[in-house]
Image: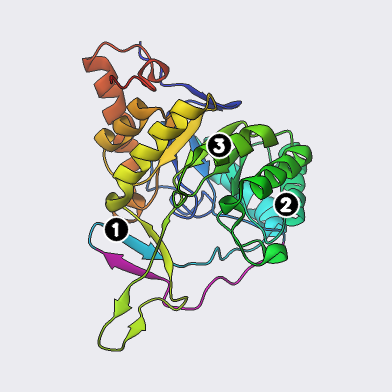
Amino acid sequence: MIDMHVNLGGLEMRSPVAVASGTFGYGTEYSGAVDFSKLGAVTAKGIRVSPWPGNPMPRHCEVPGGLVNAIGLQGAGAKQFLEMSVPWYSSRVKNAPPLIVNIWGGSIEEYAETAAMVDAASKTEKGAKIGAAELNVSCPNVKEGGHAFGQDPAVLERLVAAARSATSLPLIVKLAPNVPDVVPYVRACENGGADALSMINTIPAMVIDVEKRRSVLGNTTGGLSGRCVHPVAVKMVYDCRRATGLPILAMGGVYTATDALELIIAGANAVAVGTATFTDPSTAAKVYDGIADYLGRHSIASVAELSGSLET
């Protein structure tokens, strides 16, 4: 029997396939459209302490091979998410897997405060489905000139350490691809106490309407996701696996089982489907089936055995 189970830094996943933050709402929006039994986790849309309006419209634009979005992390805030969205997910979604709660903020203190709120909720009956916290470190640090937390290893280490002290949940750090060398950032996550890494976040991008000579997006710039970023994700996973023993949740252009298998062979322990869900909500379930079929055809006993098996 093929073992599809994955342990992602303490988060027990029955499947190596999750869904990525920002593409699956708070977990309930796809109820009835997705076979949740084939998911190992659902990563919820990012939350911070207070509600956040997000960026001005328009917020997304299709491009060849992908999507540029500038949603701006619109959200209802931690209190509403924890008191309403999480219980609703737990009670209404059949075969609901654990929730990975994506956290963001404008300061280290806000990250820690949100992590503490999530931690407290996870210890209650209503929050029992909360399985891990994921730090989105691609946000601007408002206290230090707007520079993204994930662009400075020293600040990143302090951020991870603060979140680590605020929660006993498995702590995942979501890294951005737009750095010259990922190793210092991996080391910062390790030193700060991260249990796992997730990658990649979107790539900074821009689309211009040449007739109007203005950006298509209301925020001027956005983040690129979709098929076109997949080779970047594979390379980053490969680099990270050579630098760390931390488990890796990989995402970036996963549309098929082959895409997912590339990431796993490069060193990922699990994968997440993101932008593909918008065009086909059943993508994650199809990716699960394809991974299981591949393992069976190649007489590989488990996903864990396949992870990092690239021959060089």
Q: Secondary structure at mark 2?
A: helix
Q: What coloring was used for the rendering?
A: rainbow
Relative image position of residue 108 (x, y in whole percent): 73, 53
Q: Secondary structure at mark 1?
A: strand
Name the N-terminal-most of marks 3 and 2. 2
**CA neighbours of label 3 inside 10 A, class few (<14), some (14 to 19), many (20+):** many
Relative image position of residue 258 (x, y in whole percent): 25, 34
Magenta run includes residue 62: yes
For the residues marked 3 and 2, what is the alpha-carbon distance in whole angstroms?
A: 23 Å
The residue wearing badge 2 is 114
Q: Is residue 183 left or right of residue 83?
A: left
Please tell me whether the stretch drawn in magenta is mainly helix, strand or loop. loop
| Residue located at (44% from left, 79% from top) | 218
Q: Secondary structure at mark 3?
A: helix
The residue wearing badge 1 is 66
> Vertically, is 112 above or below 198?
below
Magenta run includes residue 200: no
Dot in front, 3 or 1: 3
The residue wearing badge 3 is 186
Instruction: Indicate the quadrant where residue 262 lies.
Output: top left
Residue range corresponding to the magenta coloring: 50-63
| Residue located at (34% from left, 56% from top) | 278
For the residues marked 2 and 1, what is the alpha-carbon distance in whole angstroms?
A: 31 Å
> Vertically, is 55 above or below 123?
below
**CA neighbours of label 1 inside 10 A, class few (<14), some (14 to 19), many (20+):** some
